[in-house]
Image: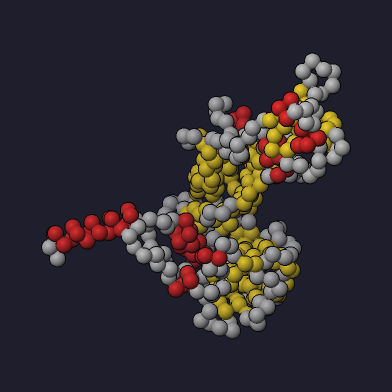
Amino acid sequence: MDMKGEYIISYIIIVCLEWGCTKPYVPDVIASSNNYLVVEGNINTGTDSTIIMLSRTVNISSGVNSIPELNATIAIQDDQNQSYNLNSRGNGRYVSPVLNLDPTREYRLNISTSDGKTYVSDYVPTMISPPIDSIGFTIQGNGIQIYVNTHDANNKTHYYRWDYTETWEFHAKYFSSYISNDTAIVIRQPSQYIYQCWTNDISTNIELGSSAKLSQDVIYEAPLVFIPSTSEKIETRYSILLKQYAMTTDGYNYYSLLKKNTEELGSIFDAQPSKLTGNIHCTTNPNLPVIGYVTAGSTQLKRVYIDNSQLPNHWNPTYPYNCELDTAFYSDHRFKGLNTVLEYLVPLPNSQIPISAIFEGSPNPVGFQYSDIDCVDCSVRGTLTKPSFWQ
């Protein structure tokens, strides 16, 4: 092909990418109705419970991420034919209490689903995680980068995986001093305050670290999560509970490929999706794909707190809703003397919440400032109960 022909093809590709002249293409695997079993979890051999999540894949166009696999039976089996059953906790969650399993054994899962199929994972060795040395953060532009430090003095781990739970304290946009009792507006008591809340989130990205190419088994400032300066997470106080797993080489390679396939695709310059092969197999139909990789071992936990006072004082969180104040009066001149307090604020349930009283020289309120519930009641997005671990 001459240079002119190559130029024309390149031009067509660029135009098609820029203007979308190609016909939408839905691959058969996306359009198919296959619902493959997905297995997630770690057989915990230490002083923590084992939690295994079972779900089913769904069509990309279905509007949901996955479907929980219910009414399955799961057992942990060791290489000496000992078996330990897990109990269903609903929503595809199967749990075993602390087992303190023998770390010299190898373990696998045996799963029977309600459709009559059985699945087993390969036996995997027990991996014992070294302690987490520290969790810290650095200021990076308009945000903070949280990182982890760890090491194995015995030089045996080399491959690490982390997941975490974030918890943070936040406030409503406005503090409400008044409340409706469905008959009148009265002063809100401290037990009825709805200004201070807590909420949490769990990690969704795959966080990995490796020291395999280093002379020492040391992980230094491995990035975990970036929090923008405008985030409510760091408005007042933030906490992260980090869980650390030690990985086998095969387990690390599986999660690396999963991360590449799920987090690092999206442009024509990214790596192409690769076939993902886990260590779980369907014994009733060996050709049936199964998604997941079962690991075994003890984990390490560490929690740290970050206070807003540790951050630049010019950072301000962005409230997630557009909030405005409005007014209501017992005799509202804007509406020919209508009692807009009774109209807007008293009836329950009510999405408008009184904030402060308007006196206008009178010893008793003549009206109230108010705003939408999303701007006044933080429990819409969190809990009013302080977590038991909160310091």
Where residue 267 sits, quadrant-wise, is bottom left
At a point 37% along the width and 60% down the height, the residue shown is: 271
At a point 65% along the width and 82% down the height, the residue shown is: 116
Outermost bottom residue: 284
- Left or right, 332 with respect to 237, comes to right
- Left or right, 346 with respect to 217, comes to right
Where residue 365 sits, quadrant-wise, is top right
The percent position of residue 66, horizontal first and vertical second, equals 59, 65
Please determine whether, in this image, residue 53 is positioned above or below residue 326: below
- Left or right, 41 with respect to 278, comes to right
The percent position of residue 248, horizontal first and vertical second, equals 52, 63
At a point 50% along the width and 47% down the height, the residue shown is: 222
Outermost left residue: 2
Q: Quadrant of the N terminus?
A: bottom left
Outermost front residue: 336
The percent position of residue 351, horizontal first and vertical second, equals 73, 41
- Left or right, 289 with respect to 385, comes to left
Where residue 304 sits, quadrant-wise, is top right
At a point 62% along the width and 72% down the height, the residue shown is: 108
How many numbered tags mark residues here? 0
Q: Depth check: 309 or 351 in front?
A: 351
Residue 370 visible in rendering: yes
The percent position of residue 40, horizontal first and vertical second, equals 60, 65
